[in-house]
Amino acid sequence: MVQPLHIRGAHIRNGKQEVAQELFTDGERFSAERHPNALTVDLEGSTLYPGLVNAHDHLELNHYPRSKFRETYDNARQWGEDMNARLNEEPYRSLRAYPLEDRCFIGGLKNLLCGATTVIHHNPPHKCLFRPDFPVRVYKNYGWAHSLRFSTEQEIRDSFQRTPPDGLWFIHLAEGTDSVAASEYQRLKALGCISPKTVLIHGVGLTQEDIGDAAPRVRALAICPTTNRYLLNAVANIKAWVDAGGKYAIGSDSRLTSAGDLTHEFPSLIDELDKQGIMDDRGLETNLFTTDPFAPGAAADFFIPGHPGWNRKFTALVVKGGLPQIGDPAIMRKFTHIQTVEAQLDGKLKAIQRSLARRIHQCGLKETGLEVEAPPKGKWFSFIRQQA
């Protein structure tokens, strides 16, 4: 059972609003009141945010290097064809040979390290993604099709129809700047796949007319700014989308095309909003599932950015399901019920809870920039020395 917590002293942010000064958990979920066995943890001076939702990632592709084979693509199908033609070349051939479980684990770890505790995976629901020791929670109630280029029309229809009304259905759409991309929304609409459960991915090539039709009808447009700039040198018309009543969410995509994780996507988003003359983040959907992630009964996921120029190196604490996963040693020591190992993340000292550290050591792939203390002989973990 996860230790119930009473978090006090911190500023607790939910979107742009500051909520209660205290948080209670009854284990893995938030609670309305203090559990009788709760551990009180004073986080005075810190600002807590709900765990982030990454709206688009391919979790098994994050061990690959960022790759493209021409300066700019007119359409992502060109990139896909270029990529597929090189899968049996190095380094891709060797990287493809790693076990699926290890490849997925690296994708989950990438997200956890930056404070993203929930990920929408755009590929099959591999069993390993839903293991209790997977680093992040992966949204289960979803359907997906790759795209109009790499999925048949029948596959797209079948996938959409199998997805329940209370689920979400995802497809790469209009990922380009050419006439092919501009035609895709009408093709998808003709297939009967536009509804409140639909989430369109990328949407760079959506026409003004299509935006006006789609924005008020679909759940959201998922934007991956660093991928879109890298491959297409263009990003969706966010202003037109929001003006038409649409919501949008941010995804990191995989490292095969993105700059990294959500700490790279948000600054890129700010740049795009500025270029498009948008003065605020109106329309931004940071959580596709609930408007109040701190509500009693919600998963006890939160993090402390720890630095104005937020990135994973300075992320001071990440908690998933009420259990601290990684953080600055001084903060992790406040959670006296957990055992940790020492680590370096991009050159900064961290403490990682021992079961996560064990899984990191078991993985055949290594996360670049993360060095976790090797377990002493005969043990899986060591304790961070208590400081006075």
Image (cartoon, helix red, strand yellow):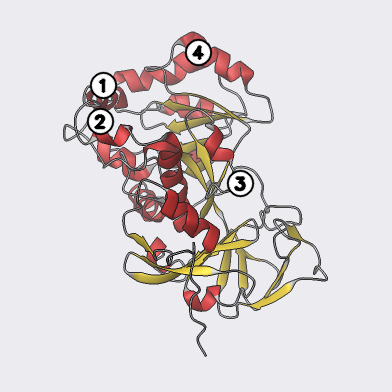
**Residue type marked 1:** Glu
In the displayed structure, 165 sits above or below 285; it is above
Q: Amino acid at mark 3?
A: Pro
Tag of residue 81 = 1
Q: Report helix, strand or loop for mark 1.
A: helix
Who comes first in sequence, dot 4 or dot 1? 1
Name the mark nearer the viewer: 4 or 3.
Answer: 3
Q: Position of residue 292 (x, y in %)?
A: 68, 53
> According to the image, label 2 marks what residue?
93
Residue 304 x %, y %? 52, 67
Check disc 4 and report its element: helix, strand or loop: helix
Labelled pair 1, 3 in contact (Cβ < 8 Å): no
Q: Quadrant of residue 17?
A: bottom right
Q: On the image, numbered disc 3 is attached to which residue?
A: 132
For the point 73% across and 56% down, which residue is it?
A: 295
Give the Cα separation between the discs numbered 3 and 2.
30 Å
Q: Is residue 155 visible?
A: yes
Which residue corresponds to the image point at 61% horizontal and 29% vertical from the top-left?
A: 197
Circle 4/circle 1 CB separation < 8 Å? no
